[in-house]
Amino acid sequence: MIMATKKILIVEDEPDLVGVLEYNLKKEGYSVESALTGSEALRKIAAGQLPDLILLDLMLPDISGVDVCRQCRSQERTRTVPILMLTARGEETDRVAGFEVGADDYVTKPFSVRELMLRVKALLKRTSAPIREDDEIRFGTVRVDVPGHRVWVGDGEIGLTVLEFNLLTTLVSRKGRVQTRERLLTDVWDIHADVTTRTVDTHVKRLREKLGQAGEYIETVRGVGYRFAQND
C-alpha cells in the first residue's frame, strides 16, 4: 500500500530559514507549503488541504505564533493538528506560553536541523500510530474513543491536542501506577532533548483544566510524578 505524503506547513518570516527548512523537509519526503505571516498561514489553512503538521514561528510580523496556535486550537477542523513552535526566544515563560495555548513541541533557534527533523518525525508518528478500532477507555465520568481521538467527560465532549490526548491515554491505561516525569517524557514525547520536566507539569495542568472535575483523577505524587487514580 502506498502511503500518502505528509504535508508540512512552515510559518516563518525569515525567507532564508524557510528555504533551509523546505529543502530538508522535502529531502525527508514531505510535501511542504510555507507562509511568511500568521494571517497568510490562517488563510492557507482555511482554504486548502489541512497540513499534517505546522512548524510555527513564535515571533511573526503581524499575528504572533501564540495567537495563531490559539486560533487553530479553538477550531474543530484544526484542533488536533500537531504544532511545533520555532523561536529565538528560549525563556521558560515563552516556552510555557506556547504549551499553554496548545503547542505540542518547542524548538529554540539556533537549532540542529537533524534534531528538528527527528522532532517532526516523532510528532507525526504519534499522530498516525496504528490503533485497534475497538479501542475505548472508560473511567468514572471519562470516556475516550481512541480511534476517533475524542474524549467526553459526562455528556460533554472536550477538545484535546495530540500530546494532551496521548498523555491522558498513557496515564489512564496505567491507572494506579506512578509515572515519573522522565518516564512520561520518554513515552509521550518520544524525543526529549531540550525538553524539561516542567513541560510535563504544564501539560498535566492544562489537561486537568480541560477535564474539569474529572481532573482530580490525575493525582500528583510529590517529588516523583503523576498517577491516574486506581478507583473512581
Image (cartoon, grey):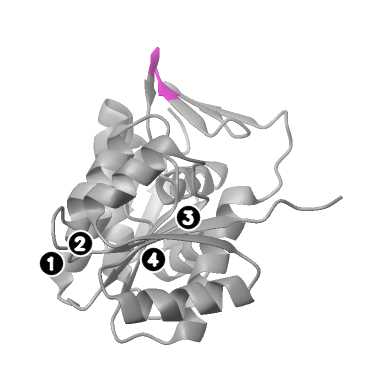
Left/right placement of residue 156 relative to residue 91 reads right
x%, y% of residue 215? 30, 35
Contact (Cβ within 8 Å) of mark 1 with mark 2: yes
Q: Which residues are magenta?
A: 152-156
Q: Identity of the amino acid at label 1?
A: Thr
The residue at which mark 2 appears reads as 96
The mark that comes first in sequence, 4 or 3, is 3
Q: Residue at x 46, y 43 (%)?
A: 165
Structural distance between the alpha carbons of marks 4 and 3: 25 Å
Structural distance between the alpha carbons of marks 1 and 2: 5 Å
Q: Identity of the amino acid at label 2?
A: Val
Q: Is residue 223 visible?
A: no
Structural distance between the alpha carbons of marks 1 and 4: 19 Å
The mark that comes first in sequence, 2 or 3, is 3
Q: Residue at x 23, y 44 (%)?
A: 70
Q: Identity of the amino acid at label 4?
A: Arg
For the C terminus, the image quarter is: top left
Please tell me the numbered disc located at residue 53: 3
Crowding around mark 4 (Cα neighbors within 10 Å: few <14, some 14 to 19, many 20+) is some
Is residue 95 placed above or below 77 in the rendered structure? below
Of circles 2 and 3, which is in front? 3
The mark that comes first in sequence, 1 or 4, is 1
x%, y% of residue 44? 38, 45
User: Disc 4 on helix, strand or loop?
Assistant: helix
